[in-house]
Amino acid sequence: MQIIEHWIGGKPTAGGSDRLAPVWNPATGEVQAQVRLATESDVDAAVQSAKAAFASWGQQSLSNRSRVMFRLRDLVERHELELAKLVAAEHGKVVDDARGEIVRGREVIEFACGITSALKGGFSNDVSRGVDSYDFRQPIGVCAGITPFNFPVMVPMWMHPIAIATGNTFVLKPSERDPSASLLIAQLYADAGLPDGVFNVVNGDKTAVDALLDHEDVAAVSFVGSTPIAKYIHERGQQRGKRVQALGGAKNHAVVMPDANMDWAASQLTAAAFGSAGQRCMAISVAVAVGDAADELVGLLKEKAEAIVVGAGDDPEAEMGPVVTQASCDRVHAYLESGVAQGAEPVVDGRGLRVEGHLGGFFVGPSVLDRVTPDMDVYRDEVFGPLLAVVRVDTLEAAIDLINANPYGNGTAIFTFDGGAVRTFERDVNVGMVGVNVPIPVPTAHYSFGGWKDSLFGSSHIHGHEGVRFYTRAKVVTSRWPRHTESQAAQLNFPTSS
C-alpha cells in the first residue's frame, strides 16, 4: 500500500517515524493509502530547512519572487484536473467542486503575483527641516500553516503564496485525511523554480501541531479548523511569542424575506447547504424564514434537496459526494435523530441512503429539518454535514437578534429585493462576512477572509492585504543627509518637527 511521505528541503522524505494513519476513500469506505505521521524531529528538520532557506529567499528581489508566483499560477492551472481528482479521491467531494476550490485558491496566487504593489511603502518629504520619513515591510521568517481536510488546496493557498511572496519560508501541516494534494503543490513549487526549503510539508497529528507551536524558530502560525482547536492554537502559539491567526467554526444563517425570489433563494440555499456535502466552513446550515416566506421556502427546499444526485466524487453525474469519514456520517445521523426527538419536523431525511456500487461509502443524503428552535442541539452545534435547519421568525429584527445571539460569526446572507432591509441587515448583524442574495460570501483574494466572535481568535483575517500585514512587519526610517560642511550642535531636549 502506498505510504504518503513528507516534503522537506525540496524533496520527498520519509522522516523518522513509523507511525502511520489511514487515508480513506470516502466513496468506497476502504483504506487507499497510509500517511506517515511526523515526529518532533521531522518537524524540526522541516523548520531548520525553512530557516536556512530564509537567509537567501528573504533577500530575493520582489521581481524574482513574483516570477515564481507567475510560474506557479500557470502550473496550478495546467494541473487543475489532476489536483481535483486527488481531492475527490481523498476528501470525497465531486471533481467539479474540487476544481472550484482550486480556482479560488489560484486567485490568491494571482494576488501574490502582484506582491510588488502590495508591499509598496510610503514616503514623506521634509517632515522636519532636512528630514524625510518613509516606511517599508519586511518578512518575519519561518511561517507555519495548519489546515483542515475540507479544502486541501484552497485553504493552504490562502496562506503560503502570500507568506512566500512577501519573502518568508513556509512549513505546511495539512490534514492527515487528505494529504496528497499538498505534496503535488510542493512539486509544482519546485517546478516553478522555488528554492529548496522555502516550502515544506509535514504530515501529522497533534504531535506535529504542538511541535510547530512550540518551535522557537517558527515566527507565525496560520490555522483554519474547529473553534476548540482554533482557541487552543491561538493560546499556545501566543504563549510562545508567535503571531497567530486562528479561524474557527461557524453556524452560518441565511435570512429569506417574504419579498425574495423564492425559487432563486431555495436554489441558492440548496447549493450552499449541500455542496461538498455541507463540509464547508461557509456552508449555510440555518435558513431563517421570515414571516410568510416559510411555507413556500420549505416546499421548494424539499423539492430541490430530493433532486440532488449523490454519488462518488469521480462520477460525472454526481452533484454531491460522501462525507469524509464514517464518524462524520454517524454524527449527521445523530443530529437528525436528536432534532426530530426535540421537536423538529423532518422534511427530507438523508439517513439510509445507498449509492449503487458504493455500499461501503460514507454517504448521507441531503436533509432538511423544519421548525428548528435555538434550544435544539442541531441548531446550537456545528454539524458540518448535509443538514439544513429551518428556523421561522416573524420579523427581520428577530432574524438579526437570532444571528447575533449565536456564538459564531463567520458568514451570513440575506435574500430580498428590499434595499432598506439589506442596509439594516448588513450594518446590524455581528458577522464578519455578509452576502446579499449571495449565500456563500467568500471574498475574492484582494479582500480578507475571516469571521467574528468564536469564528476567529486573534485580530488578523486571512489572505488579501491583511495577510500581507500578518506575514510582514513594518519598519519606519527617519533620515537626514547633512552636507559635509554643515555644522550644527545637537540639542539635548526631545526633538520636535520644525
Image (cartoon, rainbow, N blue to C red):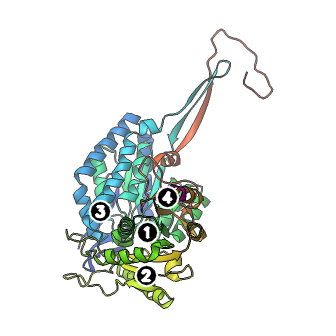
Q: Position of residue 247 (x, y in %)?
A: 50, 62
Give whichever of discs 3 and 1 has the lower sequence position.
3
Image x and y of residue 19, in percent: 37, 74
Q: Residue furthest top?
A: 485
Q: Earlier in the sequence, mark 2 or mark 4?
A: 2
Q: Could you tell me which residue is drawn at 53 percent across and 66 percent down?
A: 230
Q: Is residue 419 magenta?
A: yes
Q: Type of residue at label 2?
A: Leu
**C-alpha separation, residue under disc 2 versus residue under disc 1:** 13 Å
The answer to whether residue 496 of the structure is visible from this angle is yes
CA gap between label 1 and label 4 equals: 21 Å
The residue at which mark 4 appears reads as: 418
Say which residue appears at 50% left-offset and 88% top-offset: 343
Q: Residues within 10 Å of mark 3 (few under 14, many from 20)?
A: many
Q: Which residues are magenta?
A: 415-421
Disc 4 residue type (three-letter): Asp
Element under disc 2: strand
Mark 1 crowdedness (10 Å alpha carbons): few <14, some 14-19, many ≥20:
many
Precedes in sequence: disc 2 or disc 1: 1
- Label 4 neighbour load within 10 Å: few <14, some 14-19, many 20+: few
Determine the secondary structure under disc 3. Answer: helix
Amino acid under label 1?
Answer: Ile
Task: Report helix, strand or loop for mark 1.
Answer: strand
Q: Quadrant of the N terminus?
A: bottom left
Q: Is residue 451 above or below residue 55?
A: below
Dot 2 corresponds to which residue?
Answer: 369
